[in-house]
Image (cartoon, rainbow, N blue to C red):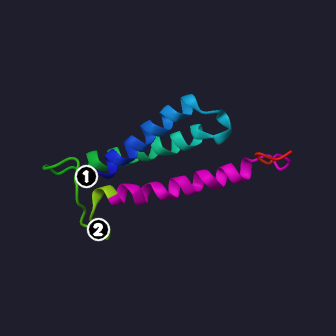
């Protein structure tokens, strides 16, 4: 299920990227999400031993596949926020003079 969660996030961000202004650097976020989706897909393909391809539960610390997908998205959004903070022009404040 974490594969589905990541792909849905990648599709959503890519769609928003076409609509919103480019100041939010959604292209970088979209690339990070698609890269993560591809890595998870490759992991699923290489680790497939029969049975369900999309698992709803895991054997790890986080047992819910959906929750695992959300937890995997958190570092991506944190890195994207850091990129936004670093790349913001120093003299411009949103809503300021």
Q: Residue furthest left?
A: 51
Q: Which residue is mark 2?
A: 60
Instruction: Give the overall secondary structure of the magenta segment.
Output: helix
Please say whether residue 45 is visible from this viewpoint: yes
Which residue occupies the foreground of this view, 64 or 41?
A: 64
Left or right? Give the position of 24 relative to 11.
right
Label 2 SS: loop
Left or right, 6 with reference to 80: left
Residue 24 pos. (x, y %): 64, 41
Residue at image coords 52%, 34%: 16
Task: Farthest residue to the top: give it.
Answer: 18
Q: Is residue 17 above or below residue 64?
A: above
Q: Which span is picked out in magenta?
A: 67-92
Residue depth check, mark 1 versus mark 2: number of the one nearer the observer: 2
Estimate the x, y position of residue 27 in percent, counting from the top left.
Answer: 58, 37
Q: Calculate the distance from the C-alpha at mark 1 to the C-alpha at mark 2.
A: 15 Å
- Going 25% across and 52% down the picture, which residue do you hit? 47
Q: Position of residue 49 (x, y in %)?
A: 17, 51
Circle 1 SS class: loop
**Residues at discs 1 and 2 in contact (Cβ within 8 Å):** no
Please rate how many residues cluster around mark 1, counting C-alpha atoms within 10 Å: few if below 14, some from 14 to 19, many from 20: few
Which residue is under mark 1?
47
Q: Residue at x 56, y 29 (%)?
A: 19
Q: Could you classify mark 2 by the number of other residues whose Cα lies within 10 Å: few (under 14), some (14-19), or many (20 or more)?
A: few
């Amino acid at each position: 299920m974490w594969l589905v969660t990541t792909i849905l996030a990648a599709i959503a961000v890519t769609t928003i990227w076409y609509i919103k202004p480019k100041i939010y650097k959604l292209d970088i976020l979209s690339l990070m999400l698609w890269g993560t989706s591809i890595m998870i897909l490759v992991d699923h393909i290489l680790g497939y031993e029969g049975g369900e391809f999309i698992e709803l539960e895991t054997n790890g610390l986080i047992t819910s596949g959906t929750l695992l997908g959300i937890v995997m998205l958190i570092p991506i959004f944190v890195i994207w926020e850091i990129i936004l903070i670093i790349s913001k022009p120093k003299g411009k404040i949103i809503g300021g003079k």
